[in-house]
Image: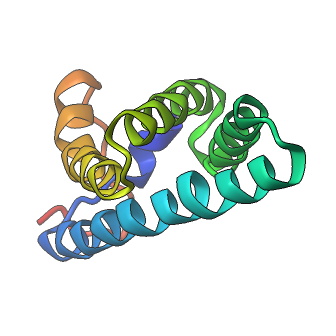
Amino acid sequence: MPVNRMMPQSPRERALYSVMAIVAGIAEEAAYRGVLMSAVWHATGFASLAVLVSALAFALGHVVQGRKSMAVIFVMACSMHALVWYTGTLVIAMAVHAVYDLLAPTVLRRISPARPTDPGRSAG
């Protein structure tokens, strides 16, 4: 999977990735489920269209992860919209997103075949 090449390898990379995962969880939920969703809903008057536009934009924002990942991300984005609607807050979606991003490297390492480290990269 293309996304495997982006996973952190060294302890330093894992630490930086953890910070990025938390920031991404907060910022992406605010941007896509908060601002973009509200802007499209206000502009069109259709919440369902706003969800689709926002989820599609979110998936397109992850194009570097490959088409299969984008499809999964689109479905996950729609699920996060449902979570925000059900809970009435972005905070829970932010936390879920951050936890998901924090756990993704561990899960991917367990379900994907091992990949050799890139030349010039330290394995530890």
In the depicted view, which residue is nearer to us: 38 or 122? 38
Tell me residue 14's x, y (percent).
19, 66
Colour approach in the figure = rainbow
Tell me residue 88's x, y (percent).
38, 46
In the depicted view, which residue is nearer to us: 21 or 9? 21
Q: Quadrant of residue 31?
A: bottom right
In the depicted view, which residue is nearer to us: 74 or 10? 74
Residue at left 76%, top 40%?
A: 53
Residue at left 43%, top 48%?
A: 5
Tell me residue 102's x, y (percent).
22, 53
- Judge whether 90 appears above or below 41 on screen: below
Residue at left 66%, top 51%?
A: 37
Residue at left 20%, top 33%?
A: 107
Res. 119 visible in picture: no
Q: Is residue 68 left or right of residue 103?
A: right
Q: Is residue 8 left or right of residue 58?
A: left
